[in-house]
Image (tube, rainbow, N blue to C red):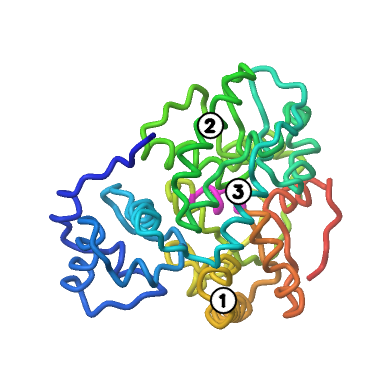
Amino acid sequence: MYKLKFNEKVCATCPSSDCLLKCQYMTFSGHKEAHAEMMKIVRGKDSRVLHECVTCYACEEYCKRGNHPFYLISERREEKGMLTAARPITNQWINMTEMQGKYLVGDVKDKALSCCYIAELGALGTGEIFKDVATAGAFGAEFMCPAVHTHFAQMSVIKERLPVVIDNFRRLGVKEVICLHDECYGTFTSIASAYGMEVPFKPVYYMDFLLERMKELKSKIKPLNIKVAYQRPCSNRLIPDKLPLVKKILNLIGVKMPKRVYQDENCLCCGEVIRSVSGYKLADDVQKRNIDDMLEAGAEYCMFNCPACQVALSEKVSKRGLKPIHIIDLCKMAIGEKEREVA
C-alpha cells in the first residue's frame, strides 16, 4: 500500500502555521495554538482539527513547504475511524464510483481527452477549440480521479484506485492526458506525487491547452466586454501554480474579473461538500456570502471551472441575477461558437 510522504520536521519547524491560521472555517488564537494542534495530528493524537475540518483542501495551498497537511488530516481521520459524513453518504460515494468495466474510449492515439466520470465534460470538449482531440475521449469510473474520497477521509480508496486509473491510461498507450476536470490534473500531479505513484504519461491541464488554442484562434475572438466572478473549485487548491491561467485566458477574450473579497487564495468553495460534512447551516452561509460578494463586486456572470461547482450553484446564482457559465463556454462564446447570453 502506498504511504504519504510526510516530513514531521517540516511541521515541527514551521514558523507560520498558515495551514491552520489561514483556514476560513476554523479559528485559532495564534501561531502557538495552531502549531500545537498540527503537531497533535502529526503525532497521531486527537485534535479538534480532526473534528472541525470541512475538507476544503485550502491548507494544501496555504502550506508553502509542500508537506501536505490536508492529506495527513484525512489519513488520521481514517486511521481513527472518524467519518466526515454519515456512513450512508460515505458508502454511496464509494459504491457509485466503483469501477465496473463500463467505460467509453474514443479514437485515442498519443493523446487522450480525459472526461473523468462527468458526462458534462464531454460536451465541453468539443468544437473548434478541441477539434484535434474531441474524438480521443476517455470516460468512466476506470478513468476517474478518486480525489473526491479525500472529502470523506477514505484515503485507502484513493490508494487502491488511483494506481489502477493510472495503469488504465498507460494501457491506452498515451503520451499525454488532457484533463478536462481540474481535480484530475490535481490528482495526477499533487496526490500521485504525495504518495510516490509514478505517472507514465504527461498530465496536461486543460487551461494550459485552452490558452494556447485561444492564442491560435485569436483572429476569431470578439472581446466579450463582460464582468465575471470566478468560482474557484476546492481542487484548484492542489495546483495553485495554475491559478494565473484564468486571468490570462480572460484577458485574451475581453473579460474582466472585478476585485472580490472571496477570490484567489481567499476563495470560498461551492459549499455542497460542506453540506455533507458540516450541515446545511454552514453550507447555506458560505453560499450566501459567496454570491453576495459576487454581486457587490458588480459581476454579471458566475464563471465555473468545475462542473460539480456549476451544478451546485447555477440555480442559486441565477435566482440572484447572475448568469452561470463554464470558462470553456466563455471561450466558445468569444469565437462565435456559442450564442452570447445576456445576464
* x then y, percent, for residue 136: 73, 27
- Count residues near mark 3 (Cα–Cα under 10 Å), then give few for <14, some for 14-19, many for 20+: many
Instruction: State the CA–CA distance, disc 1 to disc 2.
Output: 32 Å
Instruction: State the CA–CA distance, disc 2 to disc 3.
Output: 20 Å
Q: Quadrant of residue 74?
A: bottom left
Please identify the quadrant where the N terminus is shown. top left
Magenta-colored stretch includes residue 64: no
Residue 99: give its label: none
Query: For this rendering, which residue is in front, 337 or 112?
Result: 112
According to the image, label 3 marks what residue? 249
* x then y, percent, for residue 266: 43, 68
Region rendered in magenta: 243-251
Name the residue at 36% across, 40% down. Answer: 194
According to the image, label 1 marks what residue? 283
Q: Is residue 3 left or right of residue 123?
A: left
According to the image, label 2 marks what residue? 203
Number of callouts: 3
Depth check, mark 1 against mark 3: the one in front is 1
- Count residues near mark 2 (Cα–Cα under 10 Å), then give few for <14, some for 14-19, many for 20+: many
Q: Amino acid at mark 2?
A: Pro
Give the prevailing secondary structure in the magenta stretch.
helix
Dot placed on the residue nearer the N-terminal end, 2 or 3: 2
Instruction: State the CA–CA distance, disc 1 to disc 3.
Output: 30 Å
* x then y, percent, for residue 33: 19, 73
Dot placed on the residue nearer the N-terminal end, 1 or 2: 2
* x then y, percent, for residue 149: 52, 51
- Count residues near mark 1 (Cα–Cα under 10 Å), then give few for <14, some for 14-19, many for 20+: some
SS for dot 3: helix
SS for dot 2: strand
Depth check, mark 1 against mark 2: the one in front is 1
